[in-house]
């Protein structure tokens, strides 16, 4: 007996082969021209870029797996969203990213392209303005095009660092691939530009776009399980200090920085990006240091030992030829060690 076929697979195959009604105009020629005009408009503020769009084309509606192979293997890949939350992708080939970096640092596009390298946060920052300008110009160019079945206006959301996670960021559905290859005036270099645009069920001739279709509950549940299993590094921040630059440059191993004992009662639990998640106080639990989060019943510290240990002067052996006098350290005020310098045993 043959195995049953997944209905969702059949729906995707039918949707991929579905042809637009005979009375619906083909938006491909106007959309291709709109992309070329948008790229030229976005390049205007970047003196020396001299971008030359070519081979602009709009593909038919395909599923996500059919659109992803057209993306460049390297370069900047980012999620884009419309006003209703529909998500797509934009990809700039490494040659275009490097060209944007070059014109903003040296004032010109280098004749030869350098070796392919991973995109850094600085690369993303230098390319972000170009992407924003291109998306805004494309939205203006696409609005009013007859036969368009995808939103016109998108904005930059966030960079995709792991391309293997694209399937988790975009839901299943139909997408159109809007593509171009760009050259640069005076040099022989070329780079691809690709947009993966979500298709809606309605024909759109203006904005705002039609409401986003409901996501598959099973896909939402699977994505939630994967995200909840990810590890989030946390940092417990005791205090932060502001000091004159001259004083910071003069710090050396063995120096002490004063702090107030009350600082031990105000600890912030933060992500590595600096976002504060919770606040609490420093204490002990089972003979080990612990943080009692504010507002929690019972806390994480022993009731018999809720207060932190007496602050100690934290220092490391002095690196200079004349080590500090150990007998003088207890007379100093309560201090915190210089960040990055481990505390000496009490």
Image (tube, rainbow, N blue to C red):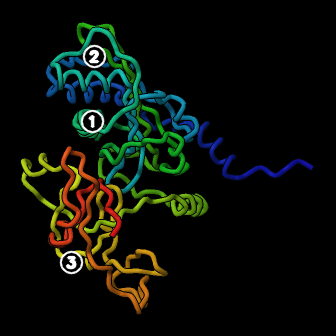
What residue sits right under mark 3 in the picture?
Answer: 261
Q: Is residue 330 above or below residue 10?
A: below
Instruction: Point out residue 171 in the picture as x, y percentages from the top left corner.
Output: 52, 51
| Disc 3 to disc 1, C-alpha distance | 40 Å
Q: Secondary structure at mark 3?
A: helix
Q: Is residue 122 above or below residue 225?
A: above
In the image, which is nearer the foreground, mark 3 or mark 2?
3
The quarter of the picture where the C terminus appears is: bottom left
Task: Give me the disc on residue 98.
Answer: none
> Going by the picture, which residue comes out furthest to the right?
1
Q: Is residue 199 above or below residue 314?
A: above
Instruction: Point out residue 267 in the picture as x, y percentages from the top left corner.
Output: 29, 73
Q: Secondary structure at mark 2?
A: strand
Is residue 261 toward the left or the right of residue 119 in the image?
left
What residue sits right under mark 2 in the picture?
Answer: 52
> Badge 2: few (under 14), some or many (20 or more) residues near its Cα, within 10 Å?
some
In the image, which is nearer the foreground, mark 1 or mark 2?
1
N-term-proximal mark, 1 vs 2: 2
Q: Is residue 126 above or below residue 258?
A: above
Residue at 41% from the left image edge and 92% from the top image edge: 304
Residue at 24% from the left image edge and 61% from the top image edge: 337
> Badge 1: few (under 14), some or many (20 or more) residues near its Cα, within 10 Å?
few
What residue sits right under mark 1 in the picture?
Answer: 122
Q: Secondary structure at mark 1?
A: helix
User: Depth check: 122 or 297 in front?
Assistant: 297
Is residue 140 visible from the viewing direction of this image? no
């Amino acid at each position: 007996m043959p195995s049953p076929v997944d209905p969702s697979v059949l729906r995707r195959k039918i949707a991929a082969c579905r042809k637009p009604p005979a009375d619906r105009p083909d938006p491909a020629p106007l959309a291709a021209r709109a992309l070329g005009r948008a790229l030229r408009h976005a390049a205007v503020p970047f003196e020396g870029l001299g971008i030359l769009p070519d081979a602009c084309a709009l593909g038919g509606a395909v599923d996500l797996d059919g659109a992803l192979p057209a993306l460049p293997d390297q370069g900047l890949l980012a999620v884009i969203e419309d006003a209703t939350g529909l998500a797509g992708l934009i990809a700039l080939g490494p040659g275009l990213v490097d060209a944007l970096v070059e014109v903003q640092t040296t004032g010109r596009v280098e004749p030869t392209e350098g070796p392919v390298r991973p995109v850094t946060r600085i690369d993303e920052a230098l390319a972000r303005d170009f992407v924003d300008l291109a998306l805004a110009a494309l939205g203006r160019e696409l609005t009013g095009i007859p036969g368009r079945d995808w939103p016109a206006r998108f904005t930059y959301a966030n960079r995709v660092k792991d391309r293997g996670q694209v399937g988790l960021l975009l839901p299943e559905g139909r997408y159109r691939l809007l593509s171009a290859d760009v050259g640069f005036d005076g040099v022989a270099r070329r780079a691809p530009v690709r947009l993966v645009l979500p298709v809606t069920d309605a024909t759109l001739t203006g904005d705002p776009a039609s409401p986003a279709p409901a996501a598959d509950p099973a896909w939402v549940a699977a994505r939630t399980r994967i995200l909840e299993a990810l590890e989030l590094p946390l940092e417990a921040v005791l205090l932060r200090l502001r000091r004159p630059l001259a004083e910071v440059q003069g710090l050396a191993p063995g120096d002490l920085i004063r702090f107030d004992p009350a600082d031990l009662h105000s600890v912030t639990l933060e992500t590595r990006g600096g976002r504060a998640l919770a606040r609490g106080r420093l204490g002990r639990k089972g003979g080990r240091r612990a943080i009692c989060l504010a507002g929690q019943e019972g806390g994480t510290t022993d009731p018999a030992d809720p207060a932190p240990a007496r602050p100690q002067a934290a220092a490391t052996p002095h690196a200079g030829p004349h080590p500090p006098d150990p007998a003088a350290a207890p007379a100093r005020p309560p201090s915190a060690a210089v960040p990055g310098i481990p505390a000496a045993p009490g």
